[in-house]
């Protein structure tokens, strides 16, 4: 019996050692050719349109920050702001609080750094990839996400959550680590969706919406580090998020014009 326990423990330790070596290999392959600073795309987009600007806030990690885009208009925030402005026929004021390398537990800090009187109409959260790579438990990630949604609602924002993308699309990550990462990102996405729905936020399943494109067209969808989206990758991701963002914006604008309760 003791021999079997010792053998099982040795197998577990051996498997963990293999995965640790593969993770180190993936980090070397990916590197940081894009640096750690995304482009600043914060501004009023489509300022020539009539009406008061809609305030759009982006929170989360490097995907939300737009790392990998060569021009600011190609970042996720800028693409969402431009497209939302076209659909609504009014300007959109973008503010990006997302930080490269952030995990779900960093959402609290991103919110705390906002001005106390800032009231976004719509907030988009995209986070989770670093939770998976840094082994943050899905339940803990979901708890931080729920707390962020509650704080955003307190500021009067409608919230859209883009759930964790499928890390199985990362060709730079060797097998079996890539398969494990895919499973972990799926479980995290499910936990995020449940947490968001419980707090009244709308979710977009990025695994289903854009995941197949990253699997089928990695050269076009990924930037040069083979980890972050390219301009096309951000365009497809923004297209997937846009319907939910537009619905949230319309609700936010209608509440602006609703009569105050007596």
Image: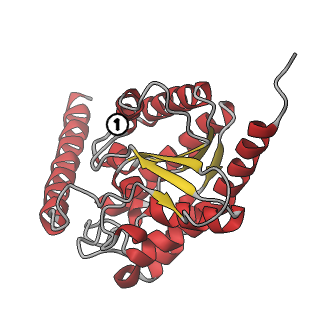
Q: Is residue 1 above or below residue 191?
A: above
Residue 154 in the image, given as x and y percentages of width and height:
60, 24
Please name the residue shown 25% across and 39% down the image: 8
- Residue 214, quarter of the rendered image: bottom left
Residue that mark 1 sits on:
136
Q: What color scheme is it?
A: secondary structure
Name the image quarter holding the C terminus.
Answer: top right
52 vs 253, left or right, is left
The quarter of the picture where the N terminus appears is top left
> What residue do we see at 35% from left, 74% from top?
222
Q: Secondary structure at mark 1?
A: loop
Residue 176 percent location from the top left of the image: 31, 62
Residue at the limit of the structure toward the right, as seen here: 262
Above or below 67: residue 59: above
Note whether 110 is above or below 262 in the view shown.
below
Residue 179: percent from left, percent from top: 38, 61
Q: Nearer the viewer, residue 209 or 16?
A: 209
- Left or right: residue 149 compared with residue 174: right
């Amino acid at each position: 019996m003791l021999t079997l326990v010792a053998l099982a423990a040795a197998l577990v330790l051996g498997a963990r050692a293999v995965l640790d070596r593969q993770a180190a290999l993936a980090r070397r392959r990916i590197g940081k050719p894009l640096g750690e600073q995304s482009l600043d795309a914060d501004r009023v987009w489509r300022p020539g349109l009539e009406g008061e600007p809609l305030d759009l806030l982006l929170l989360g990690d490097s995907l939300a920050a737009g790392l990998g885009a060569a021009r600011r208009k190609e970042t996720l925030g800028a693409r969402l702001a431009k497209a939302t402005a076209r659909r609504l026929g009014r300007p959109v004021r973008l503010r990006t609080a997302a930080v490269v390398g952030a995990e779900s537990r960093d959402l609290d800090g991103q919110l705390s750094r906002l001005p106390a009187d800032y009231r976004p109409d719509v907030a988009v959260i995209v986070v989770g990839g670093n939770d998976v790579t840094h082994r943050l438990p899905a339940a803990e990630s979901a708890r931080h996400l729920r707390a962020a949604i509650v704080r955003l609602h307190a500021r009067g924002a409608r919230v859209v959550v883009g759930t964790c993308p499928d890390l199985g699309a990362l060709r730079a990550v060797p097998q079996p680590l890539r398969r494990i990462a895919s499973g972990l990102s799926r479980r995290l996405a499910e936990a995020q969706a449940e947490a968001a729905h419980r707090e009244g936020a709308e979710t977009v399943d990025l695994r289903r919406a854009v995941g197949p494109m990253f699997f089928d067209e990695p050269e076009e969808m990924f930037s040069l580090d083979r980890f972050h989206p390219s301009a096309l990758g951000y365009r497809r991701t923004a297209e997937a998020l846009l319907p939910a963002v537009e619905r949230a914006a319309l609700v936010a604008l209608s509440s602006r014009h609703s009569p105050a309760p007596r």
